[in-house]
Image (spheres, helix red, strand yellow):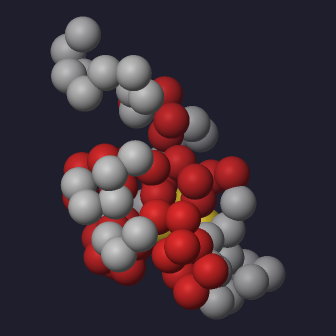
């Protein structure tokens, strides 16, 4: 994953938050320097919110059960 590509990191952060609550301090090591901006963008879009049992962490709160279905790990072009 290219941690400097904002389009790539947005999708991966959103999907990761479905699997496990995100801790910005801890998960920055995995997602790189774009994590804070991506998380902020996703919070503003209503796709991430504070986890009910872990308020310091963010979890996926968007409308889709599986946002990973919209993310291709093999191709960049979503029309393929």
Question: Which residue is drawn at the image coordinates 35% and 75% (left, top)?
Answer: 33
In-image side of 73 versus 58 (left or right): left
Residue 64 percent across, percent down from the top left: 51, 41
Question: Which residue is drawn at the image coordinates 32% and 51% (left, top)?
Answer: 2
Residue 20: image quadrant is: bottom right
Residue 30: image quadrant is: bottom right
Residue 63 percent across, percent down from the top left: 48, 48
Camera-side residue of 77 and 2: 2
**Which image quadrant: the C terminus?**
top left
Is 70 rendered above or below residue 57? above
Direction right: furthest residue: 53
In-image side of 57 versus 11 (left or right): right
- In this figure, what is the number of numbered marks? 0
Is 20 rendered above or below residue 76? below
Residue 51 percent across, percent down from the top left: 67, 76
Camera-side residue of 56 and 30: 30
Residue 79 visible within the image: yes
Residue 61 visible within the image: no
Camera-side residue of 56 and 49: 56
Is 23 rendered above or below residue 45? below
Question: Which residue is drawn at the image coordinates 39% and 21% (left, top)?
Answer: 74
Camera-side residue of 61 and 25: 25
Residue 37 percent across, percent down from the top left: 30, 76
Question: Which residue is drawn at the image coordinates 58% and 54% (left, top)?
Answer: 16
């Amino acid at each position: 994953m290219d941690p400097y590509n904002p389009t790539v990191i947005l999708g991966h952060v959103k999907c990761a938050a479905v699997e496990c609550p995100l801790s910005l301090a801890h998960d920055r090591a995995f997602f790189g320097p774009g994590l804070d901006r991506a998380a902020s963008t996703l919070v503003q879009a209503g796709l991430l919110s504070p986890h009910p049992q872990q308020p310091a962490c963010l979890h996926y709160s968007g409308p889709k059960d599986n946002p990973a279905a919209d993310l291709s790990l093999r191709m960049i072009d979503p029309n393929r």
